[in-house]
Amino acid sequence: MDEIIKKEYRKNARKKIIEMPESRKIIESKNLCSLLKNNPSFLQSDLILAFMPLNDEINTLPFIEYASECEKKIALPRITPGTNLMDFFTVTKQELTTLAEGSYGIKEPDKKSSKINFSSNEYSEKKIFIIVPGLAFTKSGKRLGRGKGFYDRFLSTLTTLNLNIYKAGVCFSCQIFDDEDFPFTENDIKMDSVFCSFF
C-alpha cells in the first residue's frame, strides 16, 4: 500500500514541477541558494556533499560554486552502475565544468577523482553539510525520492558511523506537501531541515 501511495505522490510532484513556469524556477533557485549560503550549519561545515541538478530539479550550482569559493571541500555523488549504491568524490570548482554524464543522465565526477572514505578518522570530527534532492518533502523534513533508494541507503550508512552531518532537503515550493498522509516508512531518512524559497 505504501508503494502505491508513494507512486501517486511522485506522479503528482512531477506534474507540479512541469507546470511551474521556468521564470518561477529561476527565481526560486536563486532564492534557495541564498538561503543555503547564509545557513549557520553550512557556514560552520568542513565538507559539502552536493549534487548536480537534473532538468526537473532546483538549480543548486550557484551554491556549489560559492561553497568552493569559500574554500569548502566539495564532493559529488557517483552511482555504481547496476546497483542502488553511490559514493561521493571530491571535485574542484574547475572540475564542475568538465563533469561527464553518468547514470540516469546525472553529471558525475571523473573516475580519477578522490573517493571520500567516511569511515576514516579524517571525517570523525568534521562537520558535514549535505544537500539532498527529492520529488516531494514536508516542512517537518519527510522526504520522498525517485524510488531507487540511493540517498536513504547512503544516509543510513553515515548514520551508523555517528558522523556530524546536517541533512538539508532542497526543492521548489510546488514540491512541499502536507505532513498528513505523507508516505513515510521506517527505512526513509528524515531531513534536519527542508530549504525552499517560500518559507
Image (cartoon, rainbow, N blue to C red):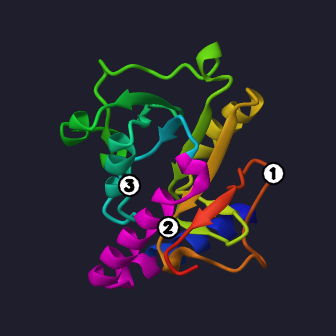
Q: Residue at x 39, y 63 (%)?
A: 57
Q: Residue at x 51, y 35 (%)?
A: 47
Which residue is disc 3 drawn over?
Answer: 63
Q: Kindly identify which numbered label has been placed on residue 91.
A: none
The spot of residue 76 in percent (x, y) is: 41, 37
Which of the 4 quarters of the picture holds residue 21? bottom left
Which residue is disc 2 drawn over?
Answer: 171
Q: Nearer the viewer, mark 1 or mark 3?
A: 3
C-alpha distance separating marks 2 and 3? 14 Å
The spot of residue 128 in percent (x, y) is: 59, 38
Q: Kindly identify which numbered label has been placed on residue 186.
A: 1
Q: Which residues are magenta?
A: 15-43
C-alpha distance separating marks 1 and 2? 22 Å
Q: How many marks?
A: 3
Q: Closer to the camera, 58 or 135? A: 58
Q: Against 73, is 28 above or below? A: below
Please tell me which of labels 1 and 2 falls first in the chain: 2
Q: Amino acid at mark 2?
A: Cys
Which of the 4 quarters of the picture holds residue 107? top left
The spot of residue 192 in percent (x, y) is: 70, 55
